Image (tube, rainbow, N blue to C red):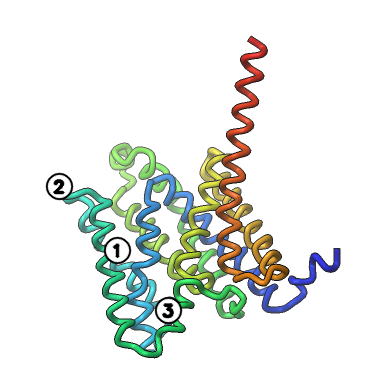
Amino acid sequence: MSSLAEPFTVSFVLRALIGGVLLSVVCALVGVWVIARGMTFLGEAMSHGMLPGVAVASILGGNLVAGAAVSALAMSAGVNALRGSREFGRDTSIGLLFVGMLSIGVIVVSHSRSFATDLTAFLFGDVLAVDRSDLLLLALTGAAMAAVSTVFHRHFLALTFDPRKARTLGLRPDLSNAVMMILLTVAMAVAFSVVGTLLAFGMLIAPSAAAMLVARRIPAVMLTSFTFGSLATVTGLWISWFAATAAGATIAAVAVLLFFAVLAARRLTTAVLLRSGRAAA
């Protein structure tokens, strides 16, 4: 048993574990709404659309998280501005903005000889390099998002399942949508600093998608998503320690595997229940 716990006796792995658990809180509070509202493509596009802000911040010596947030906010504002267009659908506007933002980022990167290493960190991150300031940022972000989610829970619920009724009840769906977009922006900007943009998207989606297979009520789904995210963090770090694999990528891979395991278990359970019902009939 002592050998199994060995990775978590190392300080930087322990910090990575705490960071992953805190990240699971942040992603659970937003990921559930992202999936429920069919905003998965937007989350994926935003994870790449942060590149221009990160590139500029890196070149100017600024804060990368702040740069990512500004870039993501610009993209979300563009999506909101174009979402009511009659000439093309919402997915088209997201796709156009995604390609445009990514292209600008690549152009900026191409003019910086020193950004190659930073670009790798931007894409894949380094969860083992999490320090105390990162943990503090994650904790404060999680606390702030929990407070906002609590205040706007009824608004988000109405916006997700019946926007017309939300307007009738005076719940201001436009404001609720803007707040939700800000939460998504903050979550992605903070998450990328821990596991990179590609892996942050996996942690945002996979645990919440798995949770929605086993729970119904939104608070229960969020709690289950947090549990799955934390489990993926512990398991991913443990595997990466003994298998010498990239920690962040392993965590994200475990999160995705958990989703498919839950999906398989759900389908198997449904099949068994159907057979039992037919046999009883």
x%, y% of residue 218?
51, 44
Give the side of residue 85 with respect to residue 276, left or right.
left
Circle 1 sits on which residue? Answer: 98
What label does residue 119 carry, if any? Answer: 3
User: Where 260 sits versus 239, above or below?
Assistant: above
Give the side of residue 142 with respect to residue 179, left or right.
right
Q: Quadrant of residue 216?
A: top right
x%, y% of residue 88?
18, 50
Q: Residue furthest right?
A: 1
Which residue shows up at 41% across the image and 60% down it? Answer: 184
Near mark 3 (Cα within 10 A), the count class, few <14, some 14-19 or many ≥20, is some
Q: Amino acid at mark 3?
A: Leu
Q: Quadrant of the C terminus?
A: top right
What label does residue 86 carry, if any? Answer: 2
Which residue shows up at 48% across the image and 61% down it? Answer: 145
User: Where 20 sits versus 219, above or below?
Assistant: below
Q: Are marks 3 and 1 in contact (CB under 8 Å)?
A: no
Q: CA distance from mark 1 to mark 2?
A: 20 Å
Q: CA distance from mark 2 to mark 3?
A: 37 Å
Give the side of residue 280 with respect to residue 183, left or right.
right
